[in-house]
Amino acid sequence: QVRFVESGGGLVQPGGSLRLSCTASGFIFRSFAMNWYRQAPGKERELVATISDYGRTTNYADSVKGRFTISRDNAVNKVYLQMNSLKPEDTAVYYCNVRPGLSMYDYWGQGTRVTVSS
């Protein structure tokens, strides 16, 4: 069964850093691009970052470009999101998943909550 387990969130002051991790299972992880999404209170879920199947290509939302870095380790089925220079507007629950249209997209983990506040 497809499963995503996110971790690494927490409370951090503006300007701080966090590293999120996601462990995926139930599908051939190395064959698929992976995404990080986030959903802030009262807002729709948005795509934050994408990494290709072997990690050669990455893309970022304009709001996080230059501050966030996505990476992956196909040996252990993990994808990471290094978040630096965090801002209050980064406060959200963060999820990992594949792109819409794939069957795995129907499965969502519990997410990991990031709160940026002084």
Image (cartoon, rainbow, N blue to C red):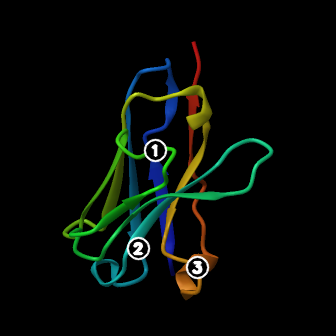
Which residue in the rendered view is the most extreme toward the top?
A: 118
Which residue in the rendered view is the most extreme toward the front?
A: 62
Mark 2: few/some/many CA within 10 Å (<14, 14-19, 20+): some
What residue is at 49 percent from the left and 65 percent from the top?
Answer: 4
Mark 3: few/some/many CA within 10 Å (<14, 14-19, 20+): few
What residue is at 58 percent from the left and 79 percent from the top?
Answer: 100
Q: Which residue is mark 2?
A: 25
Alpha carbons under labels 1 and 3: distance apart: 21 Å
Which of labels 2 and 3 is toward the front? 3
Q: Which residue is mark 3?
A: 100
Vertical position of residue 25 compared to residue 65: above or below: below
Amino acid at circle 2: Ser
Mark closer to the chain start, 1 or 2? 2
Alpha carbons under labels 1 and 2: distance apart: 27 Å
Q: Which residue is mark 1?
A: 64
Number of numbered callouts drawn: 3
Vertical position of residue 37 compared to residue 66: above or below: below
Vertical position of residue 81 compared to residue 100: above or below: above
Secondary-structure class at tag 2:
strand
Secondary-structure class at tag 1:
loop
Mark closer to the chain start, 2 or 3? 2
